[in-house]
Structure formats: C-alpha cells, structure tokens
Image: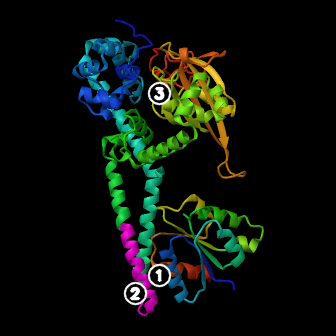
C-alpha cells in the first residue's frame, strides 16, 4: 500500500517520535534508516511525501534528492521532499527540496508543514 | 654594512641538524638543556627565538661550541626583519626600505627585535586563527559531535513535547519514550563533555600546530605511548598517531626487520624489493622506518594525489618547509605523473648537500572499479654517498619558494624573502 509519507532518518529516537506524531494525525508513514537504499525505497513505495534527513550514513540526503529529481519518471521526480538538516543553515544541496526544516524542530510546526505539503 | 649570504642557515635548523647528526632524540637533548621536547621542537623549526644562555646549554648537550650553532644569527635576524616588513600591511607609497634592513638592525637592535617579535606573534596568531577556522569548518570530530548534539536535542525535544502535551499516550509508547529520553540525555551529556574538553584544547599552545606537526614531534621524540605523549595535544593528532602505529605494525609484519636488514646489503631499494618479492613502496617505507645498515640516514616524504605531504620523516640536511608548503622540483611530484615507475634522481639543496632520491607512486581504488582512483607518491632520501648506483640527473631543489635563495628557479611561484630583488615567473 502506498504510504502518505516515507521518512529516511538514521536516528531511531527521532524517527520514533516523528512516527508517533504524524500517525496520530492520521497519516500513514514508513521508515527507512540508511542512505544506501533510500532511493530504492522511494521508487518502491512511491509515497506522497518524503521526509529526508540531510546527514545519513553511507549516502547523504542531498545525493538521494539529486537522484530523485533526475528520475525520468516525472511523477516520481516531482515527489515533494521535506529536508531535515542538523546544520545551522540549509546546505546548498538542499535547494532542490520543497521545504527545509532545521533540527531541533517543534512537533506542531512539523505537523503543520507536512499538512501544507500533503494538501 | 655587510650583505648577508643567501645560503644562511637558521640557528634552529643548525641545532636540529647537529642533533640528527649525533642520532640523538629530541627528548634527550631537551632534558639535558632543561627544556621540554615540545619547546625544543619549536626551536628546531625556528618558531621560537633562542637566547644566549639556552644556546650555551644546547651547545653543551650537542657537544659543539655555541658559536657553531649561532653562526649566521645576524643574517637570520636580517632575514626575519625583511620578512616582518614584507608581511606588514601595505602602507601605500611608503614601502619599507628592505635594502636597509642590515643597517636598521645595526643601529636600532631593540626596535628591530620588537618588530621581529611582533611579526612572529602575528604569524603565530594568524596560524592559530587558520587552524581554528579549519577545525570549526572541517574538523570531522567537531562536526560529528555537533551533529550528535543536535540529533540528541531534536529527539529530546520531540519526545518531551509528546509526553508533556499529548494526554493519552498509550502505556507501551510512554515506556518507550521514557527510555528514549534517558538514552538521549546520557548521549547529550557525554557528547557535550567531550566537546567542552576538545574546545578547551583550542586554547593551549599546542593549538598553533597542525595535527601533522604534532605527530612529527611525537615521532621525533621516539614515539612514546600515545596516552603519555605530551606532543600529541589534539584528538586529530592522536588519531593520526594511532593510524601510523597500526600501519607500521602491519608493514613490519609484512616485511620483518631481520629479513629486511639482511636484504639491505643489496643497497638498491629496487633490488631489495625484487629479492624480497615485496612491493617497492613498502620496501621504501620500511627502509626509512628501520634504517638498516646503508640506510642509517634515510628520510622519507609521502604525499597524496593533491601533492599534500602526509608523512615527513626528515633526512639530516634535507630542507623541509612548514606543512602545506614544498618545493615543486622535488622528484616526488614527478612520480605522481608516472605511477608504478621508479624515478631515480640526485638533488642538491641550496646548502650544497646532495641526496640520492627514489620516488615511486602507486594508484589504488579502495571503493572498487567505479570508485575514485587514489594516487600516493613517496620519495626515499639518502645521502649521496650511500645512494643506490646508477645514472641520475642532479636537480637543484629547495624547501619552499618563500625561503629558497634560487631566485631564477623556473618553478618559482612567489618571491623569496632572501632576495633583495625578487623575481616571479609564471602565472
């Protein structure tokens, strides 16, 4: 089944909190915790929204985003992406994201951002 | 007024050369002179002035007359004065009268010493600033720990908000979130403590060194245990030292001391490699580390594909610049362009010391066939009388353009402070 959201995040405690917050709002969410299989997970699941951590092990969120935007399947390439970054400023490589949210974030702001992107 | 010789040698360099010639460790000489090995290292690299009384103690420890160590000191002071003037911000039309440096030194020694000391202090602060900037923006340890802090804080904030604001969190989730809070709190406190300790280290004197310099000082002191090594001030240097020891151990296992010492009678590293059926680059590194008969004064330079020196094991008399600088004529750099080919060349320093060198580069693809190609070159340096046989052209090299007196060198990239009429060629 196609989930509303695919979250690619390597920090399990953050992923767990976000899963709780967003699923309570009624959205379905799948988690993936590594950079390597991130793009394959997007292709397989075709979520309505990707929440993508910038700093992932093995392959950065920026690389996954770049590959996603270069997809020949336009509907897949245009999947909305919310980039989460732990850095002080959004990196240039996050420019292809539809939105960027800095860590640490407030739960209600995350919900609000996701709602805007899914509606 | 006397003109200085372009081939002067600084006092620190003389001390270092004398110590290496005696095959004495920095720690031994420092102890005999009543100073720390780290301070002697600074003196040997001409980073600290050395007063008359300390020169006398060092001279006694090095078994030479003090005058032999300080010969040319006047010339060194003139060079330092010229460098101070050259490094000063431009004052428009009022350029410093560089040609009168010797006269100024003779007439106003106190003012000259103040100017030189101020310039050196400025230089040290500038290096410290660059070092701090590099650490703040590029240091993997710092970046990793900051990322760790932000991740823990993010998790804590989201989890704590859920527990505080969501009234009906199921029991199993509540337990899980409490465990997560405990785990993240511990992670945050541990990481924060490590960061504070690391940032405290920035304030120490060692902060003006690069990690590579710290490792070189540690090696020069005989590579004492890492946890007791005062020369290894930074985490990065300790990590480098650990890597170095692990690599040395692996290479010693691959090419044991006794077998290498026996094969070294061949003289030529290529013949030794053939006899031992071992890669030439490994043989070169082991010869420089073991220094068996015939290779007692061997030095080794290793650089990566960018030309950056990653290992500097000095040979007595071979001029080494500060990290980040080098002479483009070193055969080491020719080897980068011709991997898997041994390049044999004789080189001559500005002090007319000759060395035989063998340079050799290797390529590897540690990430597989589609990964990046990594190149590493190394140059074995041997005093010419102990060199491998064979015809080799003599290349007139230096340490780096800044302190090289070869004014007409075709590879010059910046003016030398040793020239009253600097010449720059090329772009």
Give the SS element for disc 1: helix
Q: Nearer the viewer, mark 3 or mark 1?
A: 3
Q: Nearer the viewer, mark 1 or mark 2?
A: 2
| For residue B409, side relative to residue B111 (left or right) | right
Badge 2: chain ID: B
The quarter holding residue B105 reads top left
Whether residue B206 can be seen here: yes
Residue B166 located within the stretch drawn in magenta: yes
Callouts 1 and 2 close, C-beta under 8 Å: no
Q: Position of residue B12 (x, y in %)?
A: 35, 23
| For residue B20, side relative to residue B350 (left or right) | left
Residue drawn 44% across the image and 78% down it? B158
| For residue B360, side relative to residue B87 (left or right) | right
Residue drawn 68% across the image and 34% down it? B339
Report the residue marked by disc 1: A108
- Of residue B214 and residue A74, the one placed in the foreground of this image is B214
- Range of residues picked out in magenta: B164-188
Residue drawn 25% across the image and 17% down it? B109
Q: Which mark, by number, is residue B165?
A: 2
């Amino acid at each position: 089944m196609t989930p509303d959201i695919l979250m690619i995040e390597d920090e399990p405690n953050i992923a767990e909190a976000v899963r709780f917050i967003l699923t309570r709002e009624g959205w379905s969410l799948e988690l993936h915790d590594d950079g390597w299989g991130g793009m394959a997970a997007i292709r397989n699941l075709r979520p309505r929204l990707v929440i993508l951590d910038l700093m992932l092990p093995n392959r950065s969120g920026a690389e996954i985003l770049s590959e996603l935007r270069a997809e020949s399947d336009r509907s897949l390439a245009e999947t909305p992406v919310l980039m989460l970054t732990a850095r002080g400023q959004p990196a240039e490589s996050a420019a292809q994201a539809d939105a960027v949210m800095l860590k640490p974030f407030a739960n209600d702001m995350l919900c609000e951002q996701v709602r805007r992107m899914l509606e | 007024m006397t003109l200085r010789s372009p081939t002067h040698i600084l006092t620190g360099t003389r001390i270092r050369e004398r110590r290496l010639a005696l095959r004495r460790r920095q720690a031994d000489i420092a102890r005999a002179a009543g100073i720390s090995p780290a301070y002697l290292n600074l003196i040997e690299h001409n980073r600290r002035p050395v007063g008359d009384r300390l020169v006398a103690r060092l001279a006694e420890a090095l078994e030479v007359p003090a005058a032999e160590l300080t010969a040319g000191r006047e010339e060194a002071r003139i060079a330092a004065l010229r460098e101070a003037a050259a490094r000063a911000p431009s004052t428009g039309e009022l350029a410093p009268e560089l040609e009168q440096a010797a006269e100024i030194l003779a007439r106003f020694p106190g003012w000259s010493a103040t100017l030189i000391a101020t310039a050196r202090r400025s230089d040290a602060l500038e290096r410290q600033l660059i070092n701090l900037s590099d650490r703040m923006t590029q240091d993997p340890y710092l970046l990793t720990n900051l990322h760790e802090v932000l991740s823990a804080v993010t998790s804590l904030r989201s989890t704590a908000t859920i527990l505080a604001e969501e009234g009906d969190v199921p029991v199993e989730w509540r337990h899980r979130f409490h465990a997560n809070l405990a785990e993240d709190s511990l992670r945050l406190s541990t990481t924060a403590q490590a960061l504070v300790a690391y940032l405290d280290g920035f304030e120490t004197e060692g902060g003006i060194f690069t990690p590579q310099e710290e490792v070189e000082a540690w090696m020069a002191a005989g590579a004492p245990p890492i946890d007791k090594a005062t020369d290894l001030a930074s985490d990065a240097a300790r990590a480098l030292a650990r890597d170095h020891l692990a690599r040395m151990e692996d290479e010693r296992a691959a090419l044991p001391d006794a077998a290498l010492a026996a094969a070294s009678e061949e003289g030529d590293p290529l013949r030794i490699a053939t006899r031992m059926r071992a890669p030439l680059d490994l043989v070169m590194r082991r010869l420089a580390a073991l220094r068996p008969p015939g290779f007692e004064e061997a030095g080794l330079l290793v650089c990566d594909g960018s030309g950056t020196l990653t290992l500097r094991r000095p040979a007595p008399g071979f001029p080494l610049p500060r990290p980040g600088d080098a002479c483009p004529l070193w055969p080491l750099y020719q080897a980068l362009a011709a991997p898997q080919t041994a390049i044999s060349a004789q080189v001559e320093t500005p002090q007319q010391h000759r060395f035989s060198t063998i340079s050799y580069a290797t390529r590897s693809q540690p990430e597989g066939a589609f990964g990046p190609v990594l190149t590493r070159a190394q140059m074995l340096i041997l005093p010419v009388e102990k060199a491998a046989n064979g015809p080799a052209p003599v290349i007139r090299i230096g340490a780096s353009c800044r302190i090289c007196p070869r004014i007409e060198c075709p590879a010059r990239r910046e003016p030398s402070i040793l020239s009253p009429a600097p010449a720059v060629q090329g772009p």
